Image (spheres, helix red, strand yellow):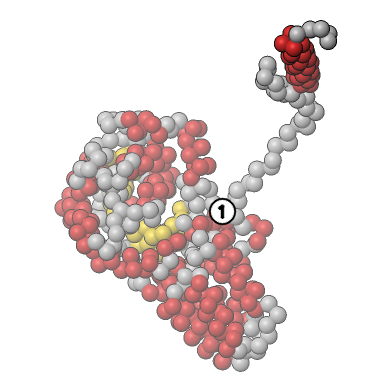
Amino acid sequence: MGNLPPAVLIGGIAGLVAVVVLVLGLMVRARSRSQAWEQVKDGGASELLPAAPKARAPAAPAVPAAAAAPPANVFGRLVQGLSRTRNQVVVGLDALFRGKKKVDEALWGSLEELLVTSDVGINTTTRLLETMRAAAAREELEDASRLRLILRDEVLRILTSRAGKIADPSATDGPLVVMVVGVNGAGKTTTIGKLAARYVAAGNKVMIAAGDTFRAAAIEQVMVWGRRAGAEVIRNDADSDPAAVAHDAVTAGLARGADVVICDTAGRLHTKSDLMEELRKVHRVIGKVQSGAPHEVLLVLDSTNGQNAIAQARQFTAAVGVTGIALTKLDGTARGGVIIGIAHELDIPVKLIGIGEGIEDLRDFEPEAFVRALFDGESESLGRGSNSASEAAKDVERGIVVEDFAQDTGTPPSGAGTG
């Protein structure tokens, strides 16, 4: 090799290096493909095939969870719905009095804070504490636990003084006309649907006026509830005059022999005078169609609004003469103590309470049952009422398809009705 020219020698070395590199590259590639194939055989991912599912041990047969049976009676449902308020007020009282034997200013201060934070309200809390202090002094109480019973009795007395019943169709000449008012989101539409279902279940022919013509999908929502309740719905086009819808509904109720006509209205802020004037117009139009109507002006209040609900009640009463209150969403708040404040501060009877979103979750307000559920309800039966999802699921069984109402601008499916 020593006689070879330098150029040839260098070229030979370069060629040898190239061969070595090529062989090494082939070996590495072969090893990589071997590993990839092993991965494929084992179910792993590779550039050739997606990952195959790993073999799994057979799953144990699913054991269906036992569904919680709803309480069989009305009181059980009431206890369910008031669970959050009870946990705030009564459980708080029990914790406050537990181990305390001395009635002192520290105890009164803690009690005042508990009642105010439960939205009983300053004025009502002051009244309750004055009554309790007088009773404690009169009885010369030394055991703080006795205050719980005094509070229970005073709450019952306040609530009983403002209890009332929703109007009875048999007491009117012609259909009973119920005008339902309230701010947006208070639960007017669902309350109307549940109220219609109650009247239908009692054997009455019920019509609903879809008077909230401004809110998106409000008419369709009323029609769904009308189908659920078995009530006829009188409707008009979106953005039409709510007073005209109410007029048509009451006129149809008179002509068709309805027992009850429930008039929905657009939700509005109680602080807007122009919007409140529209409610006055609806009220006047109803009265022109049927003398003495509306027989009931039902204000729907959201209990989660707390003390603001009292301000709403005052404004709506000034505008259209509210005759009764339906307090909704008691199942979704720990501030249900507002019902005590409403009963104490307003000369308006609380007639209905909502303790869930199921069609059966609208109850007559019965002070004794309310206080029993709030103060004496057994903890193991506490929970919540039905929710909107479970109610919507039942629509499948009822044959209700929401899209049918959204697309229909003419005659609703049977059971929903039109004007």
> On the image, which quarter does residue 23 sit in?
top right
Depth check: 6 or 82 in front?
6
Residue that sits furthest to the left in the current view: 288
- Apparent side of residue 11 relative to residue 111 in the rendered image (left or right): right
Q: Nearer the viewer, residue 305 or 77?
A: 305
Provide the residue designation for mark 1.
Answer: 384
Identify the residue at horizontal 45%, vertical 68% (top origin). 338
Q: Where is 410 relative to 311, above or below?
A: above
Residue 335, position as x, y percentages in the image: 49, 65
Residue positioned most to the right:
1
Q: Position of residue 265 (x, y in %)?
A: 28, 51
| Left or right of 202 in this view: 64 | right
Image quadrant occupied by the C terminus? top left
Residue shown at the point (26%, 30%) measured from the top left: 410
Residue 296 showing in the rendered view: no
Residue 179's place in the image compared with 413, above or below, is below
Classify mark 1: helix, strand or loop: loop
Residue type indicated by callout 1: Arg
Q: Quadrant of the N terminus?
A: top right
Taking the image as drawn, is residue 293 in sight?
yes
- Between 353 and 309, the one nearer to me in the picture: 309
Q: Position of residue 187 (x, y in %)?
A: 39, 52
Q: Looking at the rendering, which quadrant does residue 147 occupy?
A: bottom right
Quadrant housing residue 304: bottom left
Residue at the location (38% across, 55% down)? 186
